[in-house]
């Protein structure tokens, strides 16, 4: 039982490092010149009517936002033509989530 938990923990750490590296390379190549330091641009909304939001990087570590990132990876992968993180949710949901995260 202990060996399985250690293996699961190591697999989780590898996945987190892999995702972090992919996000970092995506951010570096996305041409985010007009995004303030410590922030990241994300695209939210319907496929043809996406709105760009600039959010603090600290949001990326929050469990609620992690859930959205997992959905984004499943739906789009990290190689998306928009050149940034694309979040698969409604604009209203995202603004509500950002409001919650800004208060915490």
Image (tube, rainbow, N blue to C red):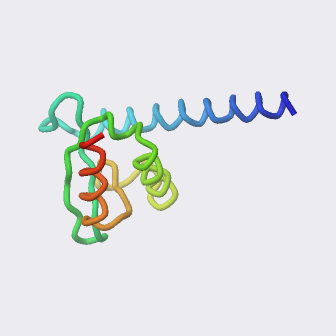
Residue that appears at 44% across and 58% down: 76
Q: Quadrant of residue 86?
A: bottom left
Location of residue 19 in the rendering, given as x and y in whole percent from the top left corner: 50, 38
Count of marks, rendered view = 0
Q: Quadrant location of the C terminus?
A: top left
Q: Residue at the left extreme?
A: 34
Q: In which quarter of the image is residue 12?
A: top right
Residue 81 or residue 32, whichever sits in front: 32
Location of residue 49 in the rendering, given as x and y in whole percent from the top left corner: 22, 70
Left or right of residue 38, residue 7 in this image:
right
Q: Quadrant location of the N terminus?
A: top right
Q: Residue at the front extreme?
A: 103
Residue 23 or residue 64, whichever sits in front: 64
Location of residue 68 in the rendering, given as x and y in whole percent from the top left corner: 43, 54
Give the vertical position of 74 relative to 38 (above or below): below
Q: In which quarter of the image is residue 62?
A: top left
Residue that appears at 30% across and 37% down: 29
Residue that appears at 29% across and 50% down: 100
Residue that appears at 33% across and 40% down: 59
Give the vertical position of 94 relative to 103 (above or below): below
Residue 15 or residue 8, whichever sits in front: 8
Left or right of residue 20, residue 45 in this image:
left
Give the vertical position of 62 relative to 10 (above or below): below
Location of residue 88 in the rendering, given as x and y in whole percent from the top left corner: 38, 62
């Amino acid at each position: 039982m202990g060996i399985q938990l250690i293996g699961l923990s190591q697999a989780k750490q590898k996945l987190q490092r892999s995702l972090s590296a992919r996000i970092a390379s995506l951010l570096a190549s996305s041409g985010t010149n007009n995004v303030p330091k410590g922030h990241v641009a994300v695209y939210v909304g319907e496929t043809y009517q996406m709105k760009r939001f600039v959010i603090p990087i600290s949001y990326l570590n929050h469990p609620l936002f992690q859930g959205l990132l997992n959905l984004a990876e499943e739906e789009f992968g990290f190689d998306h033509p928009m050149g940034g993180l694309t979040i698969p949710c409604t604009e209203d949901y995202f603004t509500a989530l950002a409001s919650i995260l800004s208060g915490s």
